[in-house]
Structure formats: structure tokens, C-alpha cells
Amino acid sequence: MAERHVLGISGGKDSAALAVYMRQTRADLDIEYYFTDTGKELPEVYDFLGRLEGFLGKPIARLNPDRDFDFWLREYNHFLPSPQTRWCTRQLKLLPFERWVKPMLVAGDLVTSYVAIRADEDYREGYTSKHPNLKVRLPFRENGVDKPGVSEILMASGVGWPEYYEWRSRSGCTFCFFQQKIEWVRLRERHPEEFEAAKTYEKDALEHGSPFTWTKGEPLASLENPERIGQIVRDYEERKAREERRRPVNPLRPELPPDLDDLYGCEEGNGACVVCHK
């Protein structure tokens, strides 16, 4: 019986900070890092993974699903994933992890999985293990590391932030349905080919009777209208100004610069999936 330690990297700030934190505080543990690659990630995510690997001094295993998004879209009758039916999380994130960890458990190994739930996220829960040999640990919650603490860890280590935080609030697929409308506008500006691909998926799904669009109640085609784009940008800037007036400045506790988590918030995105975005 062996002890194994695993830590999933989503491409987001919290899981990256946890990897750095564990490397700094528990260098005695031989942690195996993994990233579940849907094949629909932003190029900035892959750049960030490379930078993180440089700090960790070891590779991050890429877990690829046996069947891609297109396969599962057909299996689900061309119904797009949505906050109500997150089949993408199950099939492209959870299932590859379970297949990867299964040989360890079959061999009788004791596996500890470290999950980046912060101390200020009592409302979030991570992956729940159903196997007696798979234990889940939440080091940030156990040790009181909050969002400013995550910032401090990443900046002090030199790893820094993923570049997509300049315009996007979280990691995940290019067409993630948790994106807000301003994020779709930014995707169209920065990665027009990915926006067009998302639009094609949506059009095909609607033709097959899917009740969902990528953004609630509004097809992506409408986000190409200059007047609509202008309104989305103005709404975002007003929300940003309100947030900046509300937020107290504490130079000793740096936040995500700028704090896109709160600027984007959950007004349109309906929260986020912890498996994909942490």
C-alpha cells in the first residue's frame, strides 16, 4: 500500500496558488499535478501551465478525455451544456480524473487529493470522494488562506496571474456558459476564431431543438451588433465604477489586479463550477 498525493490544476488562480503553496510548505510530499484538458481551452491557459511547471520543477500531467466535446454533444442530442445540465463537467473533467486515479485505488493506494477551496469560500464545496481510499483535503480552508492570500502567494512566487484575467474572470472552455456578456464581447475581440466556433455550436444546437444558448436568453449573433456591444460595455463600466467606489483600498493585502471576480460577479454568470474554474 502506497500513499499518493494529487492536485488538480484548472488553469485558474486558486489551484495554481495551491500548487505553489504546497510546494513551499510541504516539499516533503511527492505531489502529482494534473490538468484535465478538454481541448477547448484558451491559449493563455497553456502558457500559464508552462510557467507553473517551471516553478514546480516537474510536469503537470495532461488528462485527455477518451471522447471529445463534439462526441458528447451528439450523445446529449445537441443540447448545449448549461448551469442546469453541466454534462461537460461530468464527461470532460470528472470522468477523466476518475479514470486516472482508478488504478491507484485498485492497487490499494491511499490517495489524498488537494483542492483549492479558500477560507473565504464556505459556500463552495469541491469534489466529493465516494471511495474510502480517496481523501480530499482543503489546505487553504484549513490554514485560513483567503483571496488576498492567493494573490500574495502567486505574486511573491513570481508565477503571477494567467494573462486571460485581463479580460476574463475565470478559466475554462472558450465557450463556457458561465461567461458574462462582456466576456463574450472580449472573446470576440481577442480570439475571434473561438467566438465563431462557439457561434457555430450554438446555431447547430438551436437547429436541433436545444432550449439553451451559450448566454442566457440571447444568441451570440446578437452580440455582434455594434449597438448591443456598446450597451454591454457601458453596463460593465458602470458596474466596475460602482465596485471600485465600494471596495476599500488596503495596500498591505493586494487583490486580483483588477478584481475581476467581483467586477464580473455572478449577475449573469450564475456562479461557476468549482471543478472547472478553481
Image (cartoon, rainbow, N blue to C red):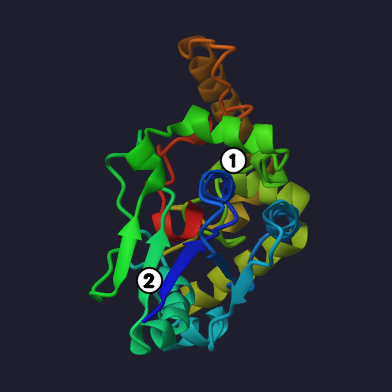
The disc placed on residue 8 is none
Number of marks in picture: 2
Residue in the foreground of this view, choosing between 131 and 176: 131
Say left or right for 122 vs 144: left
Name the residue located 48 percent from the left edge and 51 percent from the top edge: 278
Tell me the kind of residue under disc 1: Ile
Which residue is denoted by mark 2 in the rendering? 111
Name the residue located 38 percent from the left edge and 71 percent from the top edge: 111
Name the residue located 56 percent from the left edge and 17 percent from the top edge: 241
Residue in the foreground of this view, choosing between 137 and 66: 137
Figure check: 131 above or below 107: above
Q: Nearer the viewer's eye, disc 2 or disc 1?
A: 2
Q: Is residue 75 visible?
A: yes
Q: Position of residue 169 (x, y in %)?
A: 56, 42
Q: Position of residue 41 (x, y in %)?
A: 64, 64
Instruction: Name which of mark 2 and mark 1 comes first in the sequence.
Output: 2
The quadrant holding residue 84 is bottom left
Could you say whether the residue bearing mark 1 is in a helix, strand or loop?
helix
The disc placed on residue 182 is 1
Tell me the kind of residue under disc 2: Val
Tell me how far mark 2 sits from mark 1, CA to CA.
40 Å
Residue in the foreground of this view, choosing between 266 and 154: 154
Could you say whether the residue bearing mark 2 is in a helix, strand or loop?
strand
Residue in the foreground of this view, choosing between 146 and 22: 22
Say left or right for 186 vs 276: right
Q: Quadrant of the N terminus?
A: bottom left
Report crowding for label 2: few under 14, some 14 to 19, many 20 or more residues within 10 A (C-alpha): many
Name the residue located 51 percent from the left edge and 24 percent from the top edge: 239
Q: Is residue 80 visible?
A: no
The quadrant holding residue 64 is bottom right
Q: Position of residue 170 (x, y in %)?
A: 55, 47
Report crowding for label 1: few under 14, some 14 to 19, many 20 or more residues within 10 A (C-alpha): many
